[in-house]
Amino acid sequence: MEEQVDERVLEEIEALEAILMDDVSVKKSTGGTPYLVEADVFPATADDTDQQYVRVTLEVKLNPGYPDNPPEVLLRNPRGLDDERLRVIMEQIEEKCQSCCGDPILYDLIELVREHLTSSNLPACPCTICLYGFSDGDHFIKTTCYHYYHAYCLAEHATKTEKFFREEQEKLPQFQRSQTFEVLCPICREPIKCDVETLSKAPLPLAVQSASIMEPDAKLRELQDYMSALYIQQKEKGGIIDPDAADSKVLLVNEPYYVVIKSSQTVVGSSTSNSNHLYGGGESCTNTEGAPPEEETTTPRWRQRQLEQQERQRQRAMQQRDGRPVQQPKSSKPPKPAKANDDDEEGEGEPQRSIGRQRRGRGRGQKINHRNR
Amino acid sequence: MASLPRRIIKETQRLLQEPVPGISAVPDENNARYFHVIVTGPEGSPFEGGLFKLELFLPEDYPMSAPKVRFITKIYHPNIDRLGRICLDILKDKWSPALQIRTVLLSIQALLSAPNPDDPLANDVAELWRVNEAEAIRNAKEWTRKYAMED
Ligand SMILES: [Zn+2]
Ligand SMILES: [Zn+2]
């Protein structure tokens, strides 16, 4: 049977190709009948591709009998769109297909999708640095690897990694130093091109400013008690590591990987306790510097903490027996974990948000993506 | 009291509401940056049946810097030293702010399943693991039974 190409369809396809050009591709049978139309749809941002944070490919299968019969539609390759948003778009597509039998609707379908993308031109996935989503008004970045970050968050990452890079370079002899620092994508570790100075002018993300504070509950209390009980149980069996007893000579000298974190005293095998043992994990393997000696403490901080913990347990047990309310865990004195962090003191008492205020004050960078409606 | 970055609150809530199987991480009642952790020994490993306590601390600039973690319960493992310090790249130069407390603990759990004596960590445990794996595994099981099992 000879193929009869519907005039309406041919006209429609011709118009589509003229308007969308490279963003549409049409597959035709050998007889010249179009049977599949694929359109890459972006939000309408006046062709500013840097401002397009979402996209999707609309695939329309023109069944025999189209446009009198509805076409089959599929959304492929979505970026920055979550399942819920895709579901809503799909629902409206189906509706449109059912209600417009007899009329060519390809262009209408593409417009429908485009309108959706334009009205929700914000990535639906959260920023993996702060774990919060993108709100209208946030400054954010789309990397070339298609990952999204708040400008503020990426700036913090870039600044920190650059500082680390410089510090590591300092340790190398001159001829081994490299001058090129690259910011890597936190998710895929691809190099990212970004202007850190501009980025760092971005304000704190909105969702981060307005998130709720966690209140401890009974379940948390129960878990904390279980942790303490297990600790005591293992302690009694001799199963808890005692930094005092560890043979620091073996530990620090024979292991090239765990090079001296501590003072020279420790290296020669002094068994004096040093609180810095505790948190060596984070830096031990690469730190090849001899750290300056630290003063000895008579009671290691971890032991103080352990004693405090046991004391708190006793107190709580007593309070419970007496029928008094259990002390809220919000009480101010945090046990200072040994060698928590050297900069720890600085941040104490300083609300995190003040950083955001300072940054906000500096105004907006021009290159930062900013969503305008 | 120092305020806590929202991300830490969010991670804490998720750790409590959707705990990772075999891992439990609970913030200290007085310091929300300090976590009491239990990692259960993975099935089929010499650490099976053990409840290993760890401590985890989120430094001031977390998540820009890696959490500091160490084992508190004694463990016989070639990549964990006598002080409980863990040799794991993501805790050092391979840290990324896209990682979280849960991903770190999962990596540590994975390390229990796959000890790597060829990692340049030359302690006696790694040495024995290389020359006499059967005996090393026997030791690991013994330590697990002795120190990390509940009564
Ligand atoms: Zn963010
Ligand atoms: Zn990426």
Image (cartoon, coloured by chain):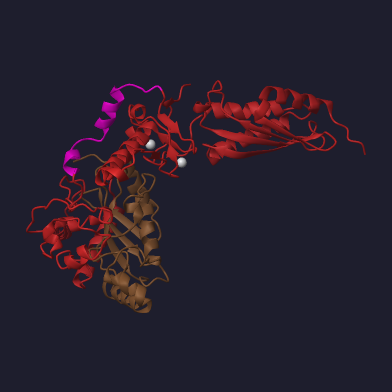
Chain colours: A red, B brown
Return the x and y of residue A217 as percentages of the image width and height: 29, 50
Is any part of residue A213 visible from this angle?
no
* Above or below, comparing residue B123 to residue A325 in the picture: below
The residue sitting at the right extreme is A1
Quadrant housing residue A369 = top left
The residue sitting at the front extreme is A175
Return the x and y of residue A70 as percentages of the image width and height: 75, 34
Look at the image and tell me in which quarter the N terminus of chain A lies: top right
* Above or below, comparing residue A47 to residue A307 in the picture: above
Residue that appears at 18% across and 50% down: A327
- Image position of B30 (left or right of B22): left
Camera-side residue of A314 and A267: A267
In reply to whether residue A87 is colored magenta, the answer given is no
- Image position of A49 (left or right of A202): right
Return the x and y of residue B127 as percentages of the image width and height: 31, 72
- Image position of A254 (left or right of B79): left
Return the x and y of residue A372 as percentages of the image width and height: 46, 22
Camera-side residue of A351 and A40: A40
In reply to whether residue A362 is colored magenta, the answer given is yes
Q: Which residues are magenta?
A: A343-366
Quadrant housing residue B42 = bottom left
Residue that appears at 28% across and 63% down: B53
Camera-side residue of A191 and B137: A191
Is any part of residue B20 visible from this angle?
yes
* Above or below, comparing residue B55 to residue A365 in the picture: below
The residue sitting at the left extreme is A298
Residue that appears at 30% across and 75% down: B145
Camera-side residue of B71 and A157: A157
Numbered disc total: 0
